[in-house]
Image (cartoon, grey):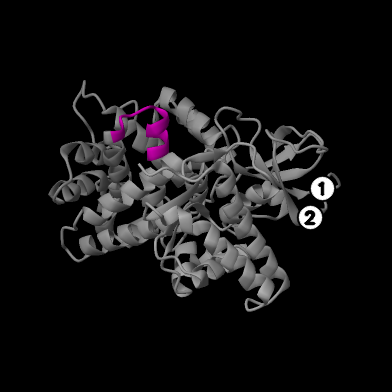
Amino acid sequence: MPKTLPREKLEQILIGMIASSRNLNLYPPDHPLVTGQVQKLFADMEPLFGRRDKASVAVVEEVLVFEGVPFYQPNIAVREFQRRIEERGVTAVEFHRGLTVGELLGWAQFLVEDNAHISGMGATKWLADKGIAHIKVRDVREVYNRAIDTISDVLGEVRMGRIPSAENAKSVVADLTEYLLNDRPALLALTLLKSYDNYLFNHSVNVSVLSLALAEALKAPAADLQVIGMAGLLHDIGKTMTPKSIILKPHQLTPEEWGVMREHPVKSSEIVAKMPGVGELCVRLVYEHHINFDRKGYPAVEAGRQLHPYSKIITISDVYDAVTTLRPYQKPFSPRDAMRIMESLAGRVIDPVYFREFIRVLGIYPVGSLVRLDTGEVAVVTETRSSEPLCPKIKILFDHSGRRLEEPIKLDLAKLRPGEASRNLIAPADPLLYGIDPFELLAN
């Protein structure tokens, strides 16, 4: 493997990227101070491609890693670089051989472009629209949206009476798995994005992501993650054959309608079984996801039948996403309230042991929870950590007097900066009392 540059040279490159972007905040792109800095950055990066085709920067477990070199105690410029790419939904960047000065100038513009604009359209598309071909990013929103498009295509094929290919679904599950292993918080945060009109699309992807997260936490073999992710993605495929009048009914279903609804796990498994390249285990997980922990769900099974452990993973993920989503017959529950509801289902619908692990994965206060601090401030949880469940990352939205802040204050309760007062979570807060939608806030 080609030897990388010394740490100080790599650091100089990151500093050069921030310096280029800062200059763009002050001067037009053709100003000598901008072009000169970009030219210097280009010269500093040339040695990276002497014996390799690409150079990679990634955020791994909150640490910036450049060409395999971790920056555990980064200087101000390196911290700023990490913050800027993460704010734009990027956790990994690849610079490829053939990189031009013009593309580096475009990259500097990317680092100062409005966060919301890039997050909305996707970092990959932004770079492509600028004609930047030799800089590739790993963009969590793009991966999630591609999963949405994939399940949309799969369901469309089923509606047309055709058996869909599994290849695109396998590819997107592989991407979701890779992203989850490298940046779980970013991907889990996107499961909060809900669409009333495209409920089945979002729900399918969310169940896949949540199932992968729980399976990984339960230390399922890496080879099985693909199967679990596929089962989560395809578990409701049979609902395309359920009349919309039943799926969208805002009131309680009649016994006859409920009988039709209960057919979907069987129909889903029958379709999945016909998809080329999908194994028997995936079919089984799809079939079993509504049988429930006490085996009193549906379809009815013979006495003594044992559920596959992975089916219990799909069940928990399915329940959580359904409870936190607006449906014709229910309002969405907050993540915290959803956990309380699921606690009441433990031992009946869901496996209590797996549920305890699910709480550990998502946190006592899951992402999207509105919380009250001991300072009287109110914040939304933006990222959790299983090792320190009471010390998540938050955005403070209201001060101690209840006044809405014009600019939210971002804090990591586990890593307070010098001079910052300590803060502790003391209780959940009701979003309705404050007139906000935490899900929408996180999406923005």
User: Relative to residue 119, is residue 177 drawn left or right?
Assistant: left
Question: Is residue 216 found inside the magenta-colored segment of the image?
Answer: yes
| Residue plotted at (31% across, 33% down) | 222
- Give the structural element (helix, strand or loop) at label 2: strand
* C-alpha gap between disc 2 and disc 1: 7 Å
Q: Is residue 161 above or below residue 317?
A: below
- Are the residues tagged 2 and 1 within 8 Å (C-beta)? yes
In the rendered image, residue 350, in percent from the top left (x then y), is placed at: 40, 30
Q: Residues within 10 Å of mark 2 (few under 14, many from 20)?
A: few
Which residue is more in the foreground, 420 or 251?
Answer: 420
* Residue receiving disc 2: 405
Q: Amino acid at mark 2?
A: Leu
For this orientation, the residue located farthest to the top is: 304
- Closer to us: 426 or 44: 44
| Viewer-nearest residue: 224 or 440 | 224
Residue 352 locus on image (x, y percent) = 43, 24
- Earlier residue among tags 2 and 1: 1
Range of residues picked out in magenta: 212-222
For this orientation, the residue located farthest to the right is: 401
Image quadrant containing the N terminus: top left
Placement of 312 over or under 162, stated as above or below: above
In the image, residue 364 lies in the stretch drawn in magenta: no
Which sits in the foreground, 124 or 328?
A: 124
Would residue 406 be seen by someone viewing this image from the given angle? Answer: yes
Q: Looking at the rendered structure, which numbered label has been put on residue 399?
A: 1
SS for dot 1: loop
Number of on-image labels: 2
Amino acid on which disc 1 is placed: Asp
Q: Within the image, what quadrant is residue 211 found in?
A: top left
Residue at image point 54% right, 39% down: 70
Magenta stretch prevailing secondary structure = helix
User: Which quadrant is the C terminus positioned in?
Assistant: bottom right
